[in-house]
């Protein structure tokens, strides 16, 4: 069971986590927890402040966040009873002060110090959650993830060394779970072979949870967040949007681009590869079943699962007679985007032109200047990408025609279909997006 930052944001959130964990105690859960909401950002900001030379300000900026932890601990742990959290917090204060001072003085490599500092979010949240659960009668035990998850030396985006990690996780957690204890681990944090603290990249707690689930062959991986699974479309656009009960991994991966609320496909891959179903649940509505993501969802002919969208898209068209019958042209175009580190989302090509979409236009002027050496360039802002996803697109005939005939009065600027067999993507004017989504939702749901 993985709980995200908003699921452990305050006293009420901890209370909810207690209820969710305690109702599933017989299933012998392992809990992976993120830092309390906003804490990772605060630690990173403190690191930057210290880097700019202001040690005192850096350390002081963390106080309100320490206080949030203290408030939770005071609320749940009776005065006078042993409170391991207080000891841990005092230790963390001392360590963070020392680490931030080292940042200011540059006395150790900065990337290493940064991970050491940011890891306190999860170190503290996992200790706090373990103590709260214990105070409420759960047989919980905090486990330091840095002893279980072994990674390479890529600070900030470390890759787990899976064989070593699997062995440690099985060895360490297996016996604890068998003894009826509930391990509480911080997500996101790990250590390299030398024992130095590393992190798995932002949002990495999902990844930690999937790694542990895979190592132990869990029955299920539950990702507890603040939305009820994945929706059929944005509920702010269409009030009849509803939760999708089952998604295939491929469908989930296609949808991931469209919202931070959907899981990053990489992070749940270890679970999916081991055929462990992943369930996205809402801490605020624990009785809802959420969305289940499985390796293959049964194909539902003529059904689509979700209509995702993204606004603020710019279309770029490059046309050149030189492209006809030549090779290397695409590669020259892509190199420009690579040089300016700009992500291309949707592409469509004809014999003498390429159309593509961007959502980050920070380097657009430079990109256009470079591309003009290759051909005529046209820039068209103000579009939206609409992405229709469903295993049903794989086999059904006539589904694409049903999509487009339900929006026959709309001008479609670009279409991409076939790269993934579960995805039909097209681009329309931004101000028509809401209307298009409503029409499609009406037609298919
Ligand atoms: N606390 C980390 C972050 O904010 C990891 C996570 O929440 O998954 O990125
Ligand atoms: Mg997250």
Image: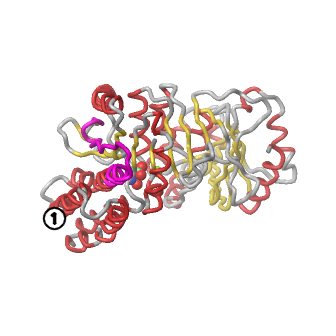
- Callout 1 crowding tier (Cα within 10 Å): few <14, some 14–19, many ≥20: many
Q: Which residues are magenta?
A: 128-150
Q: Residue at x 38, y 45 (%)?
A: 138
Q: Along the line of sight, which residue is nearer the eye, 149 or 26? A: 26
Q: Along the line of sight, which residue is nearer the eye, 169 or 414? A: 169
In the image, residue 188 sits, relative to residue 89, either above or below, namely above
Read off the residue under disc 1: 101
Q: Residue at x 30, y 43 (%)?
A: 141
Q: Along the line of sight, which residue is nearer the eye, 52 or 198? A: 198
Percent x, y of residue 335: 48, 43
The number of callouts visible is 1
* SS class, disc 1: helix
Q: Residue at x 74, y 63 (%)?
A: 431
Q: Is residue 143 magenta?
A: yes
Q: Quadrant of residue 300?
A: top right
State the colouring used for the structure image: secondary structure
Q: Quadrant of residue 190?
A: top left
Instruction: Please give left or right for residue 414 compared with residue 164 in the image.
Output: right
Percent x, y of residue 172: 28, 31
Q: Is residue 225 magenta?
A: no
Q: Residue at x 68, y 58 (%)?
A: 383
Instruction: Please give left or right for residue 15 compared with residue 388 in the image.
Output: left
């Amino acid at each position: 069971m993985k709980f995200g930052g908003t699921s452990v944001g305050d006293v009420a959130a901890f209370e909810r986590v207690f209820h969710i964990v305690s109702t599933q105690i017989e299933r012998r859960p392992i809990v992976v927890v993120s830092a309390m909401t906003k804490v990772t950002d605060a630690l990173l900001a403190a690191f930057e402040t210290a880097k700019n030379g202001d040690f005192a300000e850096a350390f002081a900026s963390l106080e309100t966040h320490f206080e949030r932890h203290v408030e939770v601990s005071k609320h749940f742990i009776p005065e006078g009873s042993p409170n391991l959290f207080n000891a841990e917090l005092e230790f963390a204060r001392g360590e963070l002060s020392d680490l931030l001072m080292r940042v200011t003085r540059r006395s150790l490599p900065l990337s290493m110090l940064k991970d050491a500092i940011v890891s306190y979010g999860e170190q503290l949240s996992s200790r706090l959650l373990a103590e709260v659960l214990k105070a409420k009668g759960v047989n919980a035990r905090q486990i330091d993830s840095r002893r279980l998850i072994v990674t390479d030396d890529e600070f900030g985006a470390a890759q787990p060394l899976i064989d070593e990690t699997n062995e440690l996780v099985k060895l360490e957690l297996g016996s604890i779970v068998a003894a009826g204890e509930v391990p509480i681990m911080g997500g996101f944090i790990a250590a390299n072979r030398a024992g130095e603290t590393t992190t798995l990249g932002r949002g990495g707690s999902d990844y930690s949870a999937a790694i542990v689930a895979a190592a132990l062959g869990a029955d299920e991986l539950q990702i507890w967040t603040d939305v009820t699974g994945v929706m059929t479309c944005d509920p702010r656009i269409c009030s009849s949007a509803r939760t999708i009960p089952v998604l295939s991994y491929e469908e989930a991966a296609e949808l991931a681009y469209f919202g931070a609320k959907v899981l990053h496909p990489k992070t749940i891959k270890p679970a999916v590869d081991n055929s462990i179903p992943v369930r996205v649940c809402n801490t605020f509505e624990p009785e809802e079943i959420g969305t289940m993501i499985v390796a293959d969802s049964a194909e539902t002919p003529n059904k689509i699962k979700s209509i995702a969208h993204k606004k603020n898209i710019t279309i770029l068209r490059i046309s050149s007679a030189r492209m006809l019958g030549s090779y290397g042209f695409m590669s020259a175009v892509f190199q420009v985007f690579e040089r300016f580190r700009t992500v291309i989302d949707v592409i469509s090509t004809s014999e003498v032109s390429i159309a593509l979409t961007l959502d980050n236009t920070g380097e657009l002027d430079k990109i256009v200047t470079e591309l003009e050496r290759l051909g005529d360039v046209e820039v068209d802002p103000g579009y939206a990408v609409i992405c229709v996803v469903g295993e049903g697109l794989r086999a059904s005939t006539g589904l694409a025609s049903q999509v487009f005939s339900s929006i026959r009065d709309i001008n479609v600027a670009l279409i991409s279909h076939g790269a993934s067999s579960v995805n039909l993507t097209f681009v329309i004017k931004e101000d028509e997006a809401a209307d298009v989504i409503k029409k499609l939702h009406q037609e298919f749901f």
